[in-house]
């Protein structure tokens, strides 16, 4: 809506929103957004229904108050509003629910039930998603109360029907305000539960670590929405050139696609000496055995060891790379996921269902190395890439407080002092550390693990305790407080199931803590980029990729290092553990080493 001069008028907000209940920066303010209609707000025992463009309303409150926004999930609340408005702080009910309760459900009904101390309701979504403005809801019965006789969130409220049922706008906004008030009540219950979680740090800095983790998880959920909206800059011409060089020109039609596929297959089948369906693992395994290779399967890592033994194996490995580009990252993938603005976009999750790493769809988390040259900064910009160095063993040192391993983290290359302690070469030291975290006990890994037991007994005891809990089907929590639900997985009594749970728990207490450190770092970097032209465009396991104006490259490098030091000071307070990041300023992702 614009006035006669064509300028959007300032949104009209209740004075008490700005001056009363939310006057203190960081005070909780719950919001439910109705796209195109307005917002429902709740704070301090009061609620408001505010019509108008939601992005303008949120931006106005953010500028005036800087609250901690409370919402059922970032996707549901602001999925259509970012990146146009920057919100500094939030409490994401779905994200904090996953931290507190683990599992795969984080829909509003499950979140409310847990916050209210009720049994988890039946059904529900496995992941929170945008509920409103879908244009697909045409249901009656929307006059029901938000809570049923058992205190559970009623279906029409939990799935958003009451907010998109064709009722008068004023009535829908009133419901949005009531739903926001419920969100605020759930957030207060979550905050009490988080504060009651045990603190594992030796010398706490600032808020208790679980509170910091809840804040970082919430920020990561908002960052996930922003990553999807912003996208990863991709040079489409370079990408098509890479695909074309590997798989040939774009097929004209289905028949041409069949012809090109046969042309890719021919050099490989010729090396094997006869007809062969390369897409059939059983046939490939039989053909390899026919050449004298007695291998149990056709996994790439196994075949790579044999690449120099026969031209057919080398040809097969080359074919596999081309086939992956053709089928998963080929022309169709580019057409589906790269928009006209040259950005690759896919849905993001702030935490997978296992240890809590950020994940993405559309191939963003599995982009082949061959395509990295296509990830390129736009004109007037650069990519700033930062990679946490040897983060999991450094995290192990922090969470276990093993004095010897803590001392090793002072070195830029942690494996060098570990090698000295084990009286081994660096390669063996690396195997030993990985064997410790992943529970490998056979071959060279087993021998290396025995050396680790002697050199770093406290770290190994920490891992063994986690493994024992997993084997026994006991739930465990990460260093930051995330629940890993293992009791639910204890139904099978098979030895293999016991062992698998044990290995999962052994690694998850490290990988999960590393994910929490990473997200806290990413949240700090996100805050530091506010008000600049720079954005985070990729979170890849232990790696951050920023897209910033060329003139801001130096500041971005300083921000990454400073944010890591700040995060480590809070997260690993008193541990003495040193965290490092390798930072590079490049034009193309492939240029970063």
Image: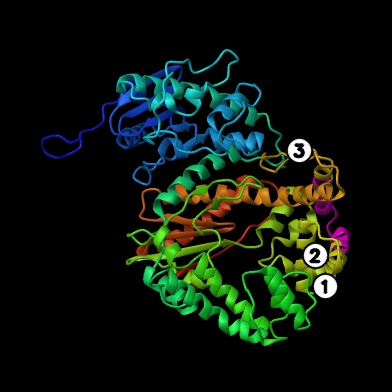
Give percent across and percent down for residue 568. Answer: 61, 50
Residue name at image x 34 percent, y 19 percent:
171
On the rendered structure, is 533 left or right of 8? right
* Eye-nearest disc, 3 or 2: 3
| Residue position for label 2 | 432
Q: Is residue 548 above or below residue 271?
A: above
Give percent across and percent down for residue 400. Answer: 77, 49
Secondary-structure class at tag 1: loop
User: Which of the two labelled residues, at mark 1 and mark 2, occupies the earlier sequence position?
Assistant: 1
Span shown in magenta: 450-467
The furthest residue to the top:
149
Q: Is residue 525 above or below residue 244?
A: above
Which quadrant of the figure contains the N terminus? top left
Q: Are marks 1 and 2 in contact (CB under 8 Å)?
A: yes
Give percent across and percent down for residue 569. Answer: 61, 48
| Distance from Cα at disc 3 to Cα at disc 1 | 36 Å
| Distance from Cα at disc 1 to Cα at disc 2 | 10 Å
**Magenta stretch mostly in which secondary structure?**
helix
Q: Are marks 3 and 2 in contact (CB under 8 Å)?
A: no
| Residue position for label 1 | 424
Residue name at image x 65 percent, y 22 percent:
117
Q: Is residue 164 above or below residue 555?
A: above
| Residue position for label 3 | 475
Is residue 464 in the magenta section?
Answer: yes
| Distance from Cα at disc 3 to Cα at disc 2 | 27 Å
* Eye-nearest disc, 1 or 2: 2
Residue name at image x 63 percent, y 77 percent:
317
Q: Are marks 3 and 1 in contact (CB under 8 Å)?
A: no
On the rendered structure, is 563 left or right of 37? right
Is residue 579 in the magenta section?
Answer: no
* Few, some or many residues within 10 Å of mark 3 (<14, 14–19, 20+): some
């Amino acid at each position: 809506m614009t006035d006669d001069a064509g300028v959007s008028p300032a949104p009209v907000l209740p004075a008490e929103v700005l001056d009363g209940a939310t006057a203190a920066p960081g005070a909780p303010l719950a919001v439910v957004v109705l796209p195109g209609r307005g917002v429902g707000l709740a704070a301090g025992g009061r609620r408001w229904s505010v019509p108008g463009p939601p992005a303008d309303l949120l931006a106005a409150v953010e500028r005036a108050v800087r609250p901690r926004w409370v919402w059922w999930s970032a996707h549901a609340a602001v999925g259509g509003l970012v990146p146009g408005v920057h919100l500094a702080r939030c409490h994401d009910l779905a994200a904090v629910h996953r931290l507190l309760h683990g599992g795969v459900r984080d829909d509003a009904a499950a979140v409310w039930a847990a916050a209210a101390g009720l049994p988890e309701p039946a059904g529900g979504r496995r992941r929170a998603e945008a509920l409103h403005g879908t244009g697909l809801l045409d249901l009656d019965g929307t006059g029901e109360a938000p809570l049923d006789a058992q205190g559970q969130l009623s279906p029409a409220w939990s799935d958003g029907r009451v907010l998109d049922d064709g009722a008068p706008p004023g009535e829908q906004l009133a419901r949005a305000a009531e739903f926001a008030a419920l969100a605020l009540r759930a957030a207060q219950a979550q905050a009490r539960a988080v504060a009651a979680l045990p603190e594992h740090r030796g010398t706490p800095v600032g808020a208790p670590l679980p509170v910091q983790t809840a804040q970082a998880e919430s920020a990561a959920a908002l960052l996930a929405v922003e990553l999807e909206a912003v996208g990863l800059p991709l040079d489409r011409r370079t990408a098509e050139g890479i695909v074309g060089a590997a798989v040939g020109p774009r097929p004209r039609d289905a028949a041409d696609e069949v012809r090109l596929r046969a042309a890719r297959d021919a050099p490989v089948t010729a090396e094997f000496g006869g007809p062969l369906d390369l897409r059939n693992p059983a046939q490939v395994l039989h053909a390899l055995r026919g050449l004298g290779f007695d291998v149990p399967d056709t996994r790439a890592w196994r075949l790579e060891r044999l690449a120099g033994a026969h031209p057919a194996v080398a040809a097969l490995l080359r074919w596999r790379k081309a086939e992956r580009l053709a089928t998963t990252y080929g022309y169709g993938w580019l057409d589906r996921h790269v928009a006209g603005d040259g950005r690759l976009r896919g849905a993001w999750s702030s935490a997978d269902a296992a240890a809590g790493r950020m994940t993405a769809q559309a191939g963003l988390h599995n982009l082949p190395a061959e395509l990295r040259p296509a990830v390129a900064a736009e004109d007037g910009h650069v990519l700033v890439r930062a990679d946490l160095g040897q983060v999991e063993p450094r995290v192990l040192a922090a969470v276990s407080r093993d004095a010897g391993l803590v001392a090793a983290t002072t070195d830029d290359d942690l494996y060098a002092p570990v090698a000295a302690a084990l009286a081994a070469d660096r390669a063996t030291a690396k195997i030993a550390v990985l064997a410790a975290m992943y529970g490998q006990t056979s071959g060279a890994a087993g021998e290396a693990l025995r050396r680790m037991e002697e050199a770093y007994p406290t770290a190994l005891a920490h891992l063994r305790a986690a493994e024992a809990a997993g084997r026994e089907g006991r739930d465990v929590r990460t260093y930051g407080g995330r629940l890993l639900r293992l009791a639910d997985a204890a139904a099978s009594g098979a030895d293999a199931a016991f062992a698998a749970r044990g290995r999962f728990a052994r690694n998850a207490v490290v990988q999960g803590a590393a994910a929490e450190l990473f997200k806290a770092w990413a949240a700090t970097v996100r805050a530091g980029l506010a008000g600049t032209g720079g954005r985070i465009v990729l979170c890849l396991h232990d790696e951050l990729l920023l897209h910033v104006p060329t003139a801001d490259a130096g500041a971005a490098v300083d921000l990454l290092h400073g944010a890591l030091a700040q995060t480590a000071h809070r997260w690993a307070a008193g541990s003495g553990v040193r965290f490092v990041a390798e930072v590079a300023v490049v034009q193309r992702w492939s240029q970063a080493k």
